[in-house]
Amino acid sequence: MPTDQRGRSSPTPKMKILVLTLFIFLVQWNWVSAEIAAPKSVPAGGTLELTWSGEPPKGGRFQVVTENGETLKGGAYGYLHKEGMPIKIAAPLTPGTYGVALAQGGDFKGLKSFKVTAVTATLEVPKSVEINAPLKVAWEGPAYSSDIVAITDVGGNGRTGSYAYPSNSEGSVTLTAPLKPGAYEVIYLMKTEVLAREPLTVGGTQAALQVPETVQAGGDLDIHWQGPNNSGDIISVVKPGANKRGTVYTYTGNSTGNRVMLTVAETLGDFEVIYLTGSEVSARAPFK
């Protein structure tokens, strides 16, 4: 066997070829003995749970790809942190056939195919509701943790108003109607996919206030009111033109027979009484 300048043996070309052949054999044997196990199908937006039959690979990640083993835009991925533990990856939102593989060194290895099946949802929504009123919505759907039931504009694909997570409820959620009358929709949203939508009309119950023209400084102001009387609706004394409640106010729910009494400040001048539902002033009436 050849030796180097220090008298140590150096591998011959045949030995190098033998070592390389053995290395390739071991790598191939590893791929035969260690592979990805994936379910045949998973619901859209669900969790794809994989297992890996060997030790955690050195580097790389397990990634959702096309069924032909090519890069999938937005394909989710996960890592194996401990031998024997499952690898959980988010399934695509669109039904179809996909693949999952070990992405390593720019290549996809050990491709396994699986199908994504469609999911559906339904909503039961009242035909109409008053502004800022509570709205009970019955639902059926996958109820993933990020799913929402929400109010949106007609044709909208994302929430623009009140929303709730169905996963936190048992078959129904309560939303709050918009502050402006008009046509809306309630949608069931799974990430970016609208699974169901139903129309909703928000009515504009008119509020009205009747107050005396004048009141003595520090005296009691007798107020008669009409309005939606939603939870949290307020009647307040404010400076002219103000759109937020003042320091003197009460809740319409505390009144009896649509009549409230408020004690005004000792300050002389012009004031108004306003009816607030949510952040909207529905009515105002001046007094001195």
Image (cartoon, rainbow, N blue to C red):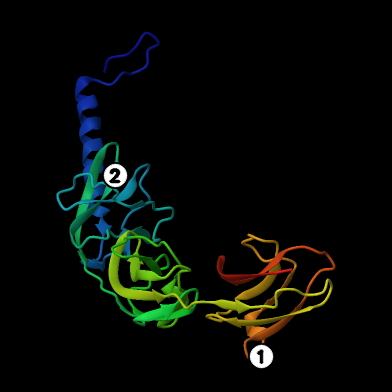
Determine which residue is flagged by label 2: 103
Q: Nearer the viewer, residue 21 or 215?
A: 215
At a point 22% along the width and 69% down the height, the residue shown is 118
At a point 58% along the width and 79% down the height, the residue shown is 231
In the displayed structure image, the side of residue 90 where residue 17 appears, left or right: left
Q: Nearer the viewer, residue 166 or 74?
A: 166
Determine which residue is flagged by label 1: 256
**Amino acid at dot 2:** Ala
In the displayed structure image, the side of residue 265 where residue 88 appears, left or right: left
Residue 19 in view of the camera? yes
At a point 26% along the width and 18% down the height, the residue shown is 1
Q: Where does the image place residue 266, in percent across and percent down from the top left? A: 85, 68
- Residue at mark 2 to residue at mark 1: CA–CA distance: 70 Å
Residue 138 in view of the camera? no
Q: Where does the image place residue 94, in percent across and percent down from the top left? A: 22, 60
Q: Nearer the viewer, residue 154 or 76?
A: 154
